[in-house]
């Protein structure tokens, strides 16, 4: 990487950091949670990472939408959409849904053959649960990134290395 | 499964996706809703267009 390119990249990153900082200050975020805490919480409870970072009503909207989407898919398939044995690819895309996924695994019907009316809805159920999982992956990443930026800001204020 | 249910699902999933994708980057609520609406139109239009192309391809080939 050339020196000019490196400098330009640093400028872009600094700009992004400032943008997120300003945004978080505007949203009333005062806490600076550890990035790992934000990441784990955002994964376990969709939207909780944003709630923790001060974006309260957005966190609630993410929670309601993602849990509803996952629950609809899970319910439409009577639990058969979540199965590592029957749908291995879908399983890994559903996994980022976190808490709802863990709950679904707890109530999984196991290796039972799904009834025909459930089979008819299985494609749709898989789509809903996978979309919920992938959207939560985006939320987890965003919560982590915001927490890292806040942390950096806090360390810089106290004159500590990042 | 019935076509109306698939269409309703497409609209619902597009709405959820567009809100989540925009809300993580846009701090202003009103602006976020506006951008989510345009992203929603883009998503539904794109998927419907792609679907129409597939149907056309099936009909012709």
Image (cartoon, rainbow, N blue to C red):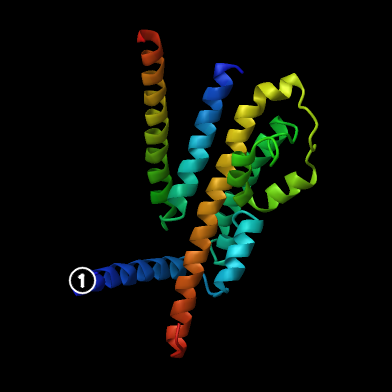
Q: Which quarter of the figure is the N terminus of chain A placed in?
A: bottom left
Q: Nearer the viewer, residue A161 or A23?
A: A161
Report in which chain the residue with disc 1 lies. A
What is the x, y in percent for residue B17? 49, 42
| Rendered position, A125 above or below B21 | above
Q: Which residue is mark 1?
A: A2
Quadrant assignment, res A89: top right
| Rendered position, A157 above or below A92 | below
What is the x, y in percent for residue A118? 72, 25
- Name the residue located 49 percent from the left edge and 60 percent from the top edge: A142
Q: Tag 1: Cα neighbours inside 10 Å, few (<14), some, or many (≥20)?
A: few
- Name the residue located 60 percent from the left edge and 53 percent from the top edge: A60
- Name the residue located 56 percent from the left edge and 51 percent from the top edge: A136
Tell whether A106 sits left or right of A43: right
Q: Is residue A20 visible?
A: yes
Q: Residue furthest bottom?
A: A159
Tell whether A132 sits left or right of B42: right
Regarding mark 1 in the picture, which secondary structure is present there? Answer: loop
Q: Which quarter of the figure is the C terminus of chain A placed in?
A: bottom left
- Name the residue located 60 percent from the left edge and 59 percent from the top edge: A42
| Rendered position, B14 above or below A116 | below
Number of numbered discs visible in the structure rendering: 1
Q: Is residue A28 visible?
A: no
Q: Nearer the viewer, residue A40 or A69?
A: A40
Q: Nearer the viewer, residue A29 or A162?
A: A162
What is the x, y in percent for residue A140? 55, 58
Quadrant assignment, res A121: top right
């Amino acid at each position: 990487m050339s020196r000019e390119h490196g400098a330009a990249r640093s400028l872009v990153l600094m700009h992004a950091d400032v943008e997120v900082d300003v945004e978080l200050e505007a949203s009333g975020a005062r806490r600076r949670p550890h990035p790992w805490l934000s990441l784990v919480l955002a994964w376990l409870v969709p939207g909780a990472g944003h709630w923790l970072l001060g974006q309260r009503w957005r966190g609630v909207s993410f929670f309601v939408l993602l849990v509803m989407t996952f629950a609809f898919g899970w319910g439409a398939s009577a639990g058969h959409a979540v199965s590592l044995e029957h749908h291995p690819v879908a399983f890994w895309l559903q996994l980022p849904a976190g808490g709802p996924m863990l709950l679904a695994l707890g109530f999984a019907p196991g290796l039972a053959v799904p009834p025909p009316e459930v089979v008819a809805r299985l494609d749709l159920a898989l789509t809903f649960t996978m979309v919920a999982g992938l959207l939560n992956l985006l939320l987890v990443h965003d919560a982590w990134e915001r927490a890292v930026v806040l942390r950096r800001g806090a360390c810089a204020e106290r004159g500590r290395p990042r | 499964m019935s076509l109306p249910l698939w269409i309703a699902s497409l609209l619902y999933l597009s709405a959820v996706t567009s809100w989540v994708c925009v809300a993580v980057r846009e701090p202003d609520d009103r602006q976020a809703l506006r951008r989510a609406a345009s992203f929603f139109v883009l998503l539904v239009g794109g998927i419907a267009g792609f679907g129409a192309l597939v149907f056309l391809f099936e009909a012709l080939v």
